[in-house]
Image: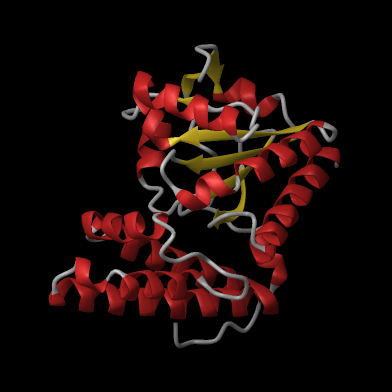
């Protein structure tokens, strides 16, 4: 994190390195991070315009300080501070070398694909990821769960987005973490909440031991939204936090436009 890139290629390499470091931090001590995200989902802290993810985590940790031992609190504070520094550097790189956002790849050097799955929607209809993505010029995939305040708060906005995308050969898909493996009670609760909010876009679930299920298990913050192109490729970085904020809405729109432009070329 100390060396400054001299060109876009070096900036891309550093960008990947920083993302890997951030993911490594969030993958360490997962049970402790889950406690942090539970507190965040209670509405204690939310990502605001102009605030990076590390600062959001710091605020959440500070607000829930009593929930942790002194050792846990110090570790979380130190880790969240490092994530904040990483996020600031990522933003700096993206502003200086905007082209790297179009070249971001996974650790294997290939475009990162959304994990394949065979599942069902909440009405029991069979859903296959390859057919789902190939049918849309762009698919916005939103991870949420029923008792997550920020998640519920954006359901109506996501439904409006789904209607807007329908005119551009696109769609919104929801994945409620509680419904994986076809949990009947969770499915019914999700359906009732979606109906109450007037959200009619498709929600799907799949086995937790599938490739997509393991991917879902690595989603530590809710809501988290991915943009996927017709080939099943993930476009850009995940949008962490509700899309109701201006910064998140702007980031999501940019990724959607990128996928639509690529589909027309």
User: What residue sits 62% from the left and 71% below the top?
Assistant: 49
Image location of residue 65, percent across then percent down: 25, 73
Image location of residue 98, percent across then percent down: 71, 70
**Among all residues in the image, which is located at the extreme front?**
196
Q: Is residue 16 left or right of residue 97?
A: left
Q: Is residue 218 left or right of residue 51?
A: left
Total marks placed: 0
Q: Is residue 111 visible?
A: no
Q: Which is nearer the eye, 36 or 83?
A: 36
Q: Quadrant of the C terminus?
A: top right
Q: Which is nearer the eye, 109 or 145?
A: 145
Quadrant of the image occupied by residue 129: top right
**Among all residues in the image, which is located at the extreme top?**
125
User: What residue sits 74% from the left and 40% below the top?
Assistant: 160
Image location of residue 106, percent across then percent down: 50, 52
Quadrant of the image occupied by residue 101: bottom right
User: What residue sits 53% from the left and 57% below the top?
Assistant: 241
Quadrant of the image occupied by residue 76: bottom left
Q: Which is nearer the eye, 88 or 203?
A: 203
Q: Is residue 124 visible?
A: yes
Q: Quadrant of the N terminus?
A: bottom left
Image location of residue 33, percent across then percent down: 29, 59
Q: Is residue 129 above or below residue 19?
A: above
User: What residue sits 35% from the left and 22% below the top?
Assistant: 185
Q: Is residue 128 above or below residue 227?
A: above
Q: Which is nearer the eye, 90 or 80?
A: 80
């Amino acid at each position: 994190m100390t060396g400054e890139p001299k060109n876009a290629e070096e900036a891309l390499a550093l960008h990947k390195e920083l993302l890997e470091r951030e993911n490594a931090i969030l993958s360490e001590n997962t049970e402790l991070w889950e406690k942090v995200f539970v507190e965040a989902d209670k509405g204690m802290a939310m990502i605001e315009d102009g605030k990076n993810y590390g600062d959001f985590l710091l605020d959440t940790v500070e607000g829930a300080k009593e929930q942790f031992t002194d050792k846990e609190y110090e570790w979380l504070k130190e880790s969240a501070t490092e994530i904040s520094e990483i996020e600031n550097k990522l933003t700096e790189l993206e502003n200086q070398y905007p082209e790297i956002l179009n070249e971001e790849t996974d650790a294997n050097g290939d475009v990162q694909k959304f994990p394949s799955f065979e599942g069902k929607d909440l009405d029991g209809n069979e859903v296959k990821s390859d057919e789902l993505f190939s049918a849309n010029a762009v698919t916005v995939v939103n991870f949420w769960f029923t008792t997550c305040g920020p998640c519920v708060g954006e359901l109506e906005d996501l439904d409006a987005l789904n209607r807007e995308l329908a005119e551009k050969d696109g769609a919104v898909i929801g994945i409620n973490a509680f419904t994986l493996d076809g949990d009947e009670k969770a499915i019914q609760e999700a359906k009732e909440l979606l109906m109450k909010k007037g959200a009619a876009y498709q929600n799907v679930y799949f086995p937790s031991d599938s490739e997509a299920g393991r991917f879902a298990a690595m989603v530590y913050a809710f809501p988290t939204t991915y943009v996927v192109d017709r080939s099943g490729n993930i476009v850009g970085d995940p949008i962490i936090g509700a899309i109701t904020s201006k910064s998140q809405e702007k980031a999501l729109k940019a990724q959607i436009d990128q996928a639509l432009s690529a589909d027309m070329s």
